[in-house]
Image: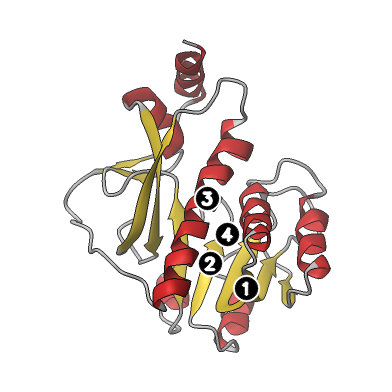
Amino acid sequence: MIINIGMLAIANSRSIHYIQKMVDNDYFPSFVIVLQSKKNEITTGQKTGNSNEKFLRILSDNNIEFQIVPTIDINDKKVIQSLSKREEYIFIYSGPSGAILKKEILSIGKKFLHIHPGKLPNFKGSTTVYYHILSDSCCSASAIFLEENIDTGPIIHIKDYPLPENNIDLDYEYDPIIRSVLLIEVLNKYVQKNTFELTKQNSKSGETYFIMHPVLRHIARLKLEK
């Protein structure tokens, strides 16, 4: 099924999990804008140098139309121009880790569907999977539409997941897996109802976390061993 939703992505582990999970569930985005380094170097969120090749191969093998934009800056004017030319109103967002959409790109009349790896509004910000592990008995993911402030957009759906197994790679396996599972649930509901049911966040509640120190990451992994 071709859905009238686009995708804006860098070819990282998360994007590969997203598109593969979508294909496995017979959901094909109508168009994909792929951000790619001009030198084809390994960038944020890419574990190996063949991520670009793998992502593009999935698109090509499934006849998904795409365009490569030679930049990894999500706010680059070339990206904004490519988005502005498209008829899709909603784009699944899977950009570079830590990138923040600025006012200009958020003002072009598109909605960006983002899967955040934390329960909102309690866990906003970065590396929230690790903070969940340290403070909770489960992990979570939240589907939202992006706004100018970090992780404050309206909530589409939230899902809890069991703590990961000790031997799983948290950054390149567990995190993308739980996000892709929630993405499919969100798309299922959208296809059934032809709309997204939104819940406004309380902007004053919750905490915003920043990239976790390596020592704390190690402590989080030790907790999984127990």
Q: Badges 1 and 2: C-beta atoms under 8 Å apart?
A: yes
Q: Quadrant of residue 2?
A: bottom right
According to the image, label 2 marks what residue? 92
The residue tagged with tag 2: helix, strand or loop? Answer: strand
Q: Position of residue 29 (x, y in %)?
A: 62, 73
5 is higher (above) or lower (below) than 184: below
32 is higher (above) or lower (below) than 94: below
Residue 95 disc label: 4
Q: Quadrant of residue 61?
A: bottom right
- Residue occupying image coordinates x 80% and y 54%: 54
Residue 181 disc label: 3
4 vs 2, front mark: 2
Amino acid on which disc 3 is placed: Val
Amino acid on which disc 4 is placed: Gly
Residue 40 appears in the figure: no
Whichever of labels 1 and 4 marks the residue nearer the N terminus, that label is 1
4 vs 3, front mark: 3
Label 1 – label 4 distance at C-alpha:
16 Å
1 vs 2, front mark: 1
Label 4 – label 2 distance at C-alpha:
9 Å
Within 10 Å of disc 3 (Cα), the crowding (few <14, some 14-19, many 20+) is: some
